[in-house]
Structure formats: C-alpha cells, structure tokens
Amino acid sequence: MSNIQRNLLLRTYIILIFSLLSLCLSFGYVPHAFSDVSTGRFSSLPIPRFISLKTEPVYMRRGPGIRYPILWVYQKRGLPLEIIEEFNTWRKVRDPNGSEGWIHQSMLSGKRSGIITNDLTELYKGLNSSSEVLAKIEKNVVLSIISCPQKIDFCNVKLSNLKGWIKKNNLWGIYSDELID
C-alpha cells in the first residue's frame, strides 16, 4: 500500500470517526420525551404535574397542533389533567380515565382540582376521619383543591358552597407526597 493510499485511508477513518462522534453527541439534544427530565423544556415547570381545564369545550388532539385530529372534546371546566410532556405551546396530558393527547396551553389553568375516585367519599368538617361528616360525594365529582398540608393524608377542598376535608387517596389530581399551600 502506498503512502497516498494510507493517507487517504487514514483521512477516511478520521472523517468516519468524527461523523459517528457528532451523531452520538447530537442524541444528547433529543427532546425530553426520550429522557427522564423533571422540568418542562418550554415552561420550566415540573413534569409531570397536575393542572385543570380553564374553559369548555376543550379539544384533545392526537398531536401538538391544530392539524392533528381531535380525539376527545371535554365539556367540564375544572377537570383535572396531568401534564406529561411539552412541545412549544402544546401540552401532552393524561385525563382521569388514562386517555392521552395534546391540548393547547391557553385551555389549561394552574388552578388545582381533583376528581373523586371512590363512590360516596366522605367530606369531613375537620382534617381527620373522626370529624363530623358534612357530605358523601359520588364518584367522578370534580371539586377545587384549596390545600393539602404536609404530614397529613387529607386535602381541604371546596364543592360549590361546601368546604371540608377529604382523604387524599380518594382524589385523582394530586400526588400522594404532594403539598399544596
């Protein structure tokens, strides 16, 4: 093999190695859907997190844009949703039934709400189960979450003009270790 062929072969290997290295490094910039990022790339807010619907109707789409088909039409203002991904001004969400799709951020609110997961859930006057029962709430009723203090398993909630305390494990819309002040 001549010196010219060796130099050409060496240059080819160097270019190939540099190209492969560049390709591998570029995977470090793939959107967070492929990694365990805990902060939204576009909002700088935690992911996942719970939010609620700001208005009605709200369209859930197959992808992040109006050109994608509508999967669901939500008619319940205040319905809690879980943001699981972000893309520009679109949020991939999960609803209480487990359906996933994309909703524009303008349709979402940071106000916290929960949905009752067990039929005839007791609403207590105080923050323990020995308190007076104010009401028994049916499954799938949406209510506002006022607070969920640290070190107790109850959340202070509001349903119409009724305020009280509900065990955290009867609500979808809050994480078991989450605090709301």
Image: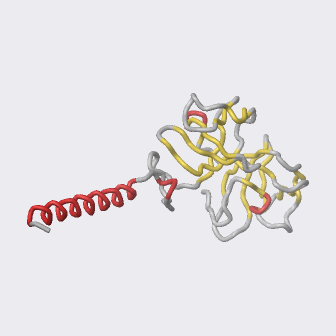
Residue 82, x across and y down, in percent: 64, 50
Establish if 57 lies above or below 85.
above
Between 102 and 112, the one lying in front of the other is 102
Q: Nearer the viewer, residue 172 or 14?
A: 14
The structure residue drawn at horizontal position 39% and vertical position 57%, both measured from the top left corner, is: 27
**Toward the viewer: 102 or 16?**
16
Left or right of residue 86: residue 112: right
Single out the residue that lies furthest toward the left.
3
**Residue 41, position in %: x, y?**
44, 50
Image quarter of residue 130: bottom right
**Residue at 59% in and 53% down:** 49
Picture mark count:
0
78 to the left or right of 49: right
Where residue 148 sits: x, y (%)?
Answer: 67, 60
Q: Is residue 177 left or right of residue 85?
A: right
Q: Nearer the viewer, residue 6 or 113?
A: 6
Image quadrant occupied by the C terminus: bottom right
Q: Quadrant of residue 142?
A: top right
Residue located 88% across and 61% down the image:
132
Q: Looking at this rendering, what residue extends furthest in the front direction?
A: 1
